[in-house]
Amino acid sequence: MTDTLAPDTFRLVEDAQLRGILDIHIDDMLEYVHSGLRDLPGYLELYDRYLRQRWNVNELDFTRDRTDWTEAMTEDERASFLAIASGFHHGERQVEIELPIFMVGCDEDHKIFISSQIEDEARHVVFFDRFYREVVGLEGDIMGTLDASYQWISETFVGPFGLLAYQAEELRRNPFDERARVRYATNYFLWIEGVLALAVMKITLGYARRRGFLPAYYTGFTATARDEARHVQGGMRFLRDAVDRDPTMLNEIFDTLRTILLMSSTTSRLVYFEPLGLTRDAVLEMLITQLNRKLVTVGFDLPDDIRGMVQMISPQLAGG
Amino acid sequence: MPAFMTPEWAEAVRDAVNRGPDPDYRAGKLEEYWSWIDNARQGFEGSVALAVRAGHDPEALQDRALLLRFSGGTCTEAAIVAPDAARDATFVLAGDRDAYVDLAAGYEAGKVVMYRRLLLEQGHLLAFFNRVYFFVEMLAVIGTVPTEFPEPALT
């Protein structure tokens, strides 16, 4: 059942309803993501988990978060928080709109699971919209708050998310191109969700937990992390199955990773992690660990040149 | 002020692309980011075409496109060409007229790509993204070149 979490902790994470999520440590949630990677569940099993684990974003009450934001957090903490969380605000929107086209080329079981993932991503967009509106104080409709928070995201955001947009366009033109689907999945499920999102989630969630701040943010974003567990496991299943059917698909995964890692070797803005209790080196280590754990667990052995590129990455503060 | 998609505008674009972003804009981003872009630019021996799409049909490009050729880190040629000639470029980006109008009005170049206002109509996708920040900042520079947009013809 689990290879990284104690059985009782696994059940707590697996079964918690929204109110109980506040009691779950983010580190346990991140371990939960990896607990299903070695024996990747089927798509209908993941769909069943979705039905049990989905949560209502409108049940969250951000009143206390607003007080923490305006009265308890320092200006440095708010600045660092926005520099990190805004990548998710936009990232969730981008993965929501770029996923439906991938579903067209899926088999029937996979289509059912992807339909649930699309709903998850839409809910995550609403979660961040509510946070930016009710806690940070931005105004406007969904796109209005996105436009208002764009000022805080790095220019290098367009690397993985521009690539995803263009990969989705490539699939729109030929939805059954299996090689293009594998390249898309490498960027979306392995890199954006499996590496960026999970590593960067820990920064703001770890901060909120240590300081006892932002309980609705902690609850909703930790529930989001549990949703990501299903997405990453489904995505890694797709990649592993694709490689099992045709081992040359590994070349598509590796070529995509080379581009992603090249784009990730720089950043346009300096973000200070220290106000949130972390260092840049620690964040880099998290990114590298997340990537290696995914690849090792599903049995993909990286070529030497990619191993070298992994050591050169710069923190990209986004996710979806 | 040169009109959009005219030889005068193309030449102004070439000058601006070779000059690069103004110092204030450049100072707002880390030097390592500009070094990455400089490396991408130096290594690019090829061409980029910017085309205007007519309607929603990706195959239907309007009668003129901007073709920029690069060698040794310099934009060596900027020409207004017919769609068939544009399709010889290493990369062809195309969007509707509004995308270019918005870019010239200061709309962020990153959003132009991320929100698919300009699409890669032709060229190797991963190779394009191997130099993506160079191309995005090039679009941002092009957006700063003053130009007039003739009213679209009635159909």
Image (spheres, rainbow, N blue to C red):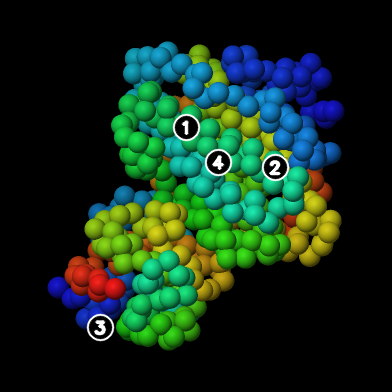
Q: Which mark is residue A126?
A: 1
Position above or below: B121 against A278: below
For marks 2 and 4, give the CA distance. 20 Å
Position above or below: A128 against A162: above
Q: Are marks 1 and 4 on the same chain?
A: yes
Q: Are marks 1 and 2 in contact (CB under 8 Å)?
A: no
Residue at left offset 49%, top offset 22%: A58
Residue under label 2: A112
Q: Secondary structure at mark 4?
A: loop
Q: Secondary structure at mark 1?
A: helix
Residue under label 3: B7
For marks 3 and 2, give the CA distance. 53 Å
Q: Position of residue A99 (x, y in %)?
A: 58, 48
Residue type at mark 1 is Val
Disc 3: CA contacts within 10 A as few (<14), some (14-19) or many (>=20): some
**Quarter-of-image position of residue B22:** bottom left
Q: Are marks 3 and 1 on the same chain?
A: no
Residue type at mark 4 is Gly
For marks 3 and 4, give the CA distance. 43 Å
Q: Chain of mark 1?
A: A
